[in-house]
Amino acid sequence: MTRIALIGTSTLMGEELKDELGRRRELWSDLRLLTFDADSMGKVADLDGAATFVNTLSEESLEGVDLIVLPGEKAAGHDLLAELPEEATLLIVAPSGPREDGYVLIDGVNLIEGGLPADAVGQRILVSPHPAAIALSLVLHPLRELGLERADGLLMLPSSIRGQEGLDELLEQSRRILNFQPDPPQQVFGHQLAFNLLPTPERSEPILADVATALGGGPRISLYLAQASIFHGCTLAIHLSFPGDPSVEKIRAALADGPFLSLSEEPHLGPIDSAGRDDIQIASLGADGSGQTGGYWLVAVFDNLTRGGAKNAVAIVEALGTSATN
C-alpha cells in the first residue's frame, strides 16, 4: 500500500483531496497531512472521522513516502518540483499555470483500468490537469468516433477556482453592494465580480495542450475562459463541428457511452446543480441554428473540485498503486 504525503490541506482543492483520500483508506497505509503555511501548522484536521495533525513540510516529514500529492495552486515555483525525494512520485492536481514537466492523466480517457498506461510507469511527475482540461477531454473523447472535426468552447469559471480567497471576496463584494456600502474588495479579481462577468488572466493554451495530450491529438479545439459571478460549479458551452451530420440522436448515444457523463432532461440545469456531484452533466444539446449541417451546441456543467479535481486525482493514486503491485 502507498505512503502518501498530501501538501496544502488549507486550500479548497487540498480539503477536497483530504476528504476523498480519507474515504479511500484501502489506497494507502500512511497519509500525512503537510503544509507550507505557518498558520496551518499544528492544526487538527478531520480525516474521515479521525483527528489528524497537520504538520510542517520538511525533509523529515517526507521521509519514506511513495507519493506526494500537491494541489496546483501550491505548486507554482516551489522547489519541490525540482528536488523530489528519492523514489517518490509527485502528483500535481489542477495546476493553475504552464508546467515544464509532468505526465497528464485523465480517468476515462488515457487512464486505463488496471494501472497506469505503459509509458506513464516510472514517471516522476504525474498531473491531474486543470478542471477544464478534464471536462473537455471527457466530453470530446466519445465524439471522435463520429468524426468530430472542431470544438470551440466558452468556459465560465466559479470564484472557487481562485480558492477560499476568491469565495470570500465574491461574498464580501455581494454583501457590500446589497447594503450600498462603498469600496468592495478587489484584491483577487481586480474588479467587481459580484453581479458581473469578467475576463480571466488564466490562459487557455496550457489547458488545450493537456487536452491534446490526453486525447492523443485532434480535434481542433479553441477555448475562451471567463470569470463568472458564481461560487461553485463550471458551465462549459461548446460548438461542435462535424464534416457530415451525425444527428442529435447519435451524438447523445455516443455521450451516453462516455465515462462520467450524464444526459440531463432538466431544462434549467446550471452550475449550482453540479456542486458536489461526481459526474459531468450534459445540460443541453441541439443543432446550432445556422442552417448548415454538422454544427451543434452542447452545454455541460460540472464541479471543478470533484470530477474536475479530487476524483480524477484519486483515480491516478489508485492506478499508481495497482501498477506498483503488478
Image (tube, grey):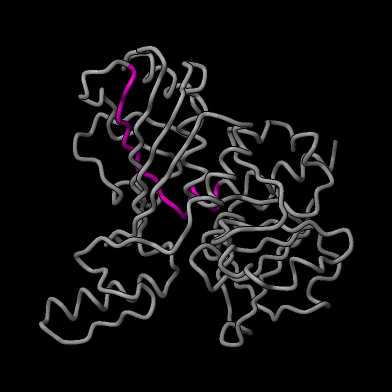
Q: How many labels does the image show?
A: 0
**Where residue 62 sits: x, y (%)?**
80, 71
Q: Which residue is drawn at 38% across and 19% down?
A: 251
Position of residue 189 relative to residue 115, above or below, is below
Image quadrant where residue 45 sits: bottom right
Q: Quick one: quadrant of the C terminus? A: top right
Q: Give the range drawn in magenta.
A: 294-311
- Kindly identify the residue that appears in the image at 34 percent across and 52 percent down: 156
- Quick check: is 264 in the magenta stretch? no
At which x and y percent is residue 108? 58, 33
Instruction: Give me the residue at 43% from left, 62% from top.
Output: 161
Nearest to the observer: residue 24 or residue 219: 219
Q: Position of residue 23 (x, y in %)?
A: 58, 53
Where does the image place residue 169, in percent across and percent down from the top left?
32, 76
Q: Residue furthest left?
A: 180
Q: In the rendered view, would you say 132 is above or below 9?
A: above
In the displayed structure, would residue 33 be above or below residue 316?
below
